[in-house]
Amino acid sequence: MAVQPFGLVDNIVTRLDCSWIESDRRLSVDRREQDINHPSHHHPLCKWDRGNINRPDIICRGCNRDLADVYCPEEGCEYFLHTFCADLGRLNNYSHVDHPLHPQHPLTFHFDSFPNDQTEFVCSFCKEAKTSGCFLLHCAHCDFYLDFYCALNFESKKTLLSQYQFPHFLHPHQGHTYSPYRSLDCKKKCRACGLSIGYNALVLKCSGFRCMYYLHVHCFRLPKEMKHPLHPQHTLTLLEGPPRPKVDPKVDDPFDLFAFNLSPGLCCNACQNNLKNLFVLHCNQCPEFILDISCAYINPNFKCDRHNHLLACFDTYWDLDDRCAVCNARCRNNGKVYRCVDCNFNVHKACLSLPLKVDYEDHVHPFTLVTSLNEDKDGKYYCDLCEERREPNHGLYCCVECGPSFVAHFECVLAPSYREGNPPWMISRRFLKTLKYKAETPTIAFTDDESLLFLKLNMKIKEMEQMLKQLPREGYRENVTEKLDELEKRNAEVEGMIRQLRELMN
């Protein structure tokens, strides 16, 4: 069974009970909001500013109702939409809508024509026949039709809505079925993935008394069992929460809370984040393999020359120890990571573009990328180009022709464009350099007189630096001569301070 494609719930639909206030079509360009590129129309659309002009005659092409507030600014183009009609499906690039009235399958858009060249359709919710003048959502699997007005105003029809109750196998309690719901609280979270429901989101809510279970439509649709590309060898089972460890009453303490509840070290095998009391995918044959639902929507689809399997992209990776297979810096807190879960092969996104071989203008042979090199006999490791210290376990470029003793930092041989955006290997090197500087720098306790003299000396040197910067801007040689005399005087003062400081230190 294939994993459903990831699709976010539309959480930007405008509230339906607000008063639509129109403004005149002839408004200045700087007062228009950002253009809306809607697939139903060949021109960019604009949202009108709020004003005091009432235009009930303007009809929305989406739901065929009045008081539209999005328009086409092109001269002679009479095309109007409501904001909420224009926003429906925008987060999915208008490819589909996950709607709670039909959670079994995604619904596809039809803007200009009806499916199968039909001249009319009957809305599956309100049972009214529609001939033209509105957009349509359709499920080809079930022949389910939904006009835009019902898609966005279903809660106003209580009697019809009461017929849409959906049971869920992980919440089988009597009287606890899920019904379509429009969330008006941004603090609500999905019981499956833990992500925010969002204001005005179309979701499913448990109708049980005082039951606060909410589910995204695509999370509701997850099957009991599935084959997943992050663990293709076995079937995964959907569970309401992480599996509890098996307890042997003869060995384990029955009053030990950790024996019966979630272990604090239990992590998702994909992103390595700590598991919460949310839905998970679990392998019965590999009891230690668990996926959280956020990772269930991730498919490996990136081919990397350095690995035989496809890699999956993770926005955040949580393991403290895993390192990049290219630069050997830590993966955590270093941006996106491309990862093969089964092999634990990890690469920073910024490291994917690093060349395996690179030519350097001041060296006759090309340099080859290696993950680490710690063959120096004296235990001190340096870059042969900048002659600064390097970390033996970090990635570097090595000249194979000259032997492994001729090596260089990434930033010493790569073009400046590779250093843009603070790549992980640059951040890691700066961090280690800072730590090493702090560790190697002794802390000296100065007296008050010594500290005050250090402060005055620092200020005097900065004044001299400013004078030196201004010298090239002087228009006359006489002015330059005067400035040089002043610099010589101040330099004598600095030398006196240094002598005084030396005497205090001795």
Image (cartoon, rainbow, N blue to C red):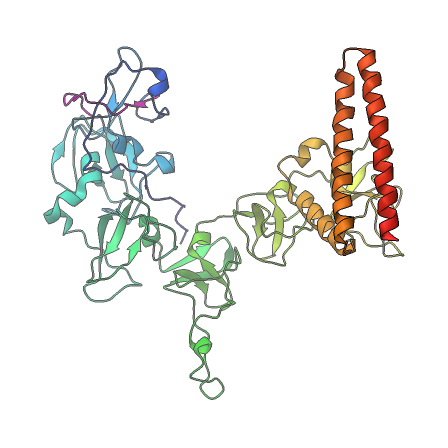
Is residue 238 visible in the rendered image? The answer is: yes
Depth check: give the residue in front, 100 or 71. 71
Relative vertical location of residue 72 with respect to residue 321 in this rendering, above or below: above
Q: Does residue 330 appear to the left or right of 152 in the view shown?
A: right
Q: Quadrant of residue 66?
A: top left
Q: Measuring from the top left, give residue 361's x and y in whole percent.
A: 82, 30
Q: Measuring from the top left, give residue 203's x and y in whole percent.
A: 28, 48
Judge whether residue 238 is colored magenta. no
Magenta stretch? Answer: 42-60
Judge whether residue 46 is colored magenta. yes
Q: Measuring from the top left, give residue 209's x and y in whole percent.
A: 19, 62
Is residue 310 visible in the rendered image? The answer is: no
| Prevailing secondary structure class for the magenta stretch in the rendered image | loop
Residue at 29% from the left image edge and 30% from the top image edge? 86
Residue at 74% from the left image edge and 37% from the top image edge? 459
Which part of the image, by quadrant, shows the N terminus? bottom left
